[in-house]
Image (cartoon, rainbow, N blue to C red):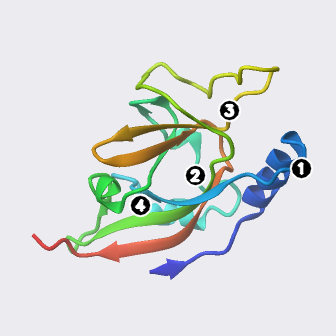
Amino acid sequence: GIYFAECAVFTFRKERMTKLSGGKEPNIVSVWHGTRDLDPMIICKDVQDGFMMQYSQRGTWGRGIYFAECAEYSNRYAYINNDGSRTMILAELLSGEEIELDPDKNLIHCPPKPAGNMRYDTVTGKSNGSKIYTVYENGRAYPRYLVTYKPRC
């Protein structure tokens, strides 16, 4: 795979999340992302934004940027190259404070926390045996590795 360094907007977002949580650094998880018809190099070469809501479509937890804990799940969304190989991104995601929710296709942001006026950072849920992470803003993830592989079948 191809390795990418942490981008500036991710670092900025991490610092902002740390400040908003009273100094507690946000959780960071390694997760998979398939891009379907979008060449993943577009995301990898975009040092300003990386993953962008503008490319997102409405899914199980609304219009957001989706990531999966299990590569097998993201394989169904992998970019298919001209030679039949597939490419996915292994990303670093600022998951921060998560809330697990049942599917809700109408979500456009995370729900509010019980106390105060702050929202959770990430919506999670289960789908086809994988934990799914959904974020609703740019700058929360960056591509760490671009992974290309050939399916066995």
Mark 4: few/some/many CA within 10 Å (<14, 14-19, 20+): some
Residue situated in front as seen by the camera: 101 or 14: 101
Pointers 3 and 4 in contact (C-beta within 8 Å):
no
Q: Earlier in the sequence, mark 2 or mark 1?
A: 1
Task: Name the amino acid, label 4.
Answer: Asp
Mark 3: few/some/many CA within 10 Å (<14, 14-19, 20+): some
SS category of the residue bearing label 1: loop
Establish if 132 lies above or below 88: above
Identify residue for label 3.
120
Identify residue for label 1.
23
- The picture places residue 137, in percent across and down from the top left corner, at 65, 39
SS category of the residue bearing label 2: loop
Question: Mark 3 against mark 4, which lies toward the viewer?
Answer: 3
- Residue 74 lies in quadrant: bottom left
Whole-Å distance between the Cαs marked 2 and 4?
12 Å
Residue at point 58% right, 58% down?
A: 29
Q: Earlier in the sequence, mark 3 or mark 1?
A: 1
- Residue 10 lies in quadrant: bottom right
As drawn, the residue found furthest toward the front would be 115
